[in-house]
Image (cartoon, helix red, strand yellow):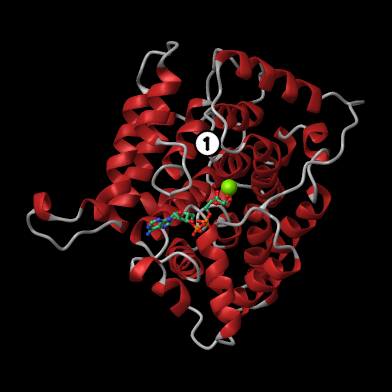
Amino acid sequence: MSSIIKTIKMATLESSVLQSKFRGSLLGSLIGDCTGSPYEGDTFTNGDKIILQRYFDKLEEPNFKAPFKPYTDDTAMMKSVAKFLIDKPEPDYKFLAKLFVNEYFKQPKRGYGENVVDVFHKLRNSKFEDVFKPAREQFLGSGSYGNGGAMRIAPIALYCHSNYKTMLEIAANATKLTHTNILGVNGALLQCIAIHQALEHHPEEKIDPKRFCLELYLKMKKIEKTDEEDVEDADPALTAYQEKLKVVEHLLGKRIDTDLDEEVIFCLGNGISSYESVPTAIYCFLRAQSEIPHIKTDNVFRRTIQYAISLGGDTDTIACMAGAIAGAHLGEEAINSDLARHCEFSKEIIEVADNLFMTRAVSPTTS
Ligand code: AR6
Ligand code: MG
């Protein structure tokens, strides 16, 4: 029944609307990355939030001139994921591993995580013999739980928008080239299904935050299956994200007061691990559906990324992930073009989104 409803929903989205959503999601991801990166590691006081408001006001002024804001590893790797989907009709993970590695060695100073750089060296030194092996060996075999898999996942959610099962499969494999810890992989899957779900809602349809969160929870429950009969004995990592989504839902129901942002940071996190950033990004998108006291704008896209940055910590990646979800819902039209023009690669990312859109129409994986 629900899959029939979904098919109807997707079918009713006009092609031009879907194309705009592809653009919106990749552009949203890029803008979150570029505008968030100067604040990486910061903690925001109320005064800092006012300065952040002014910074965004300036960036949206038509005549404001400033050097462009460079993108970081989030976008560098996202570009490779898009190319992997556009250039090869069937997923070729060795090709993706080579794209990641080439991109890194071409421009290593894009703020990559320490562990992932080690994986790139091992991939190159092993001549890409077994592309999943280096990541599996990291952290004494437990693999990385960083948010590097989630931050680059948007192109997969878009490309596979009409094939949920294939999307999960490609997203998991593309993540495992660098992140094999269950928290790293499931975090990337959660971010992927959040973008996919946002894509299903018409830009003019208002998102019901609690309902959106519940739908994500039900999907994560299917992904995070545990074989343990006694759930009490099961490793908490196995069900980590469904539990965290309950916290997101709880926070969405809370009265907005001055301590709420601190509670959000405490309960959801703002760090570089997937567990402490993907649910936070989703919360930012959902919270931004209505007004936020220290953010003066009617634009939900801007509110989403400005709020994400105001939480501090891994600002570029949390804003990048929140921006990818907001852009997938609202489409390119909802994104202020002046804000976009300050970001490196903002024109080119539209071309990437269009190529992804054209390719998915003829790809066998979307049938
Ligand atoms: N055990 C201990 N520490 C870990 C583990 C683990 N299993 N997994 C990750 N870490 P990495 P990323 C810590 O290098 O996920 C950039 O700014 C460890 O300190 O895989 O690609 C990006 O933009 C490791 O160095 O990077 C992202 O915002 C760190 O997590 C962010 O960094 C990052 O894991 C993560 O990028
Ligand atoms: Mg980052």
Residue 96 falls in image quadrant: bottom right
What x and y, as percent, mark residue 177? 50, 71
Q: Residue 253 appears in which quarter of the rendering?
A: top left
Choose between 126 and 322: the one closer to the eye: 126
Q: Residue at x 36, y 42 (%)?
A: 215
**Residue 27, above or below 112:** above
Write down the residue under mark 1: 313
Q: Residue furthest left?
A: 230
Query: Residue 9, position in %: x, y?
Result: 51, 47
Is the C terminus in the top left, top right, bottom left or bottom right quadrant? bottom right
Front-lying residue, 14 or 59: 59
Instruction: Check the image and report above or below for 34 versus 171.
Output: above
Q: Residue at x 71, y 42 (%)?
A: 34
Q: Is residue 45 visible?
A: yes
Name the amino acid type tagged 1: Gly
Q: Quadrant of residue 333?
A: top right
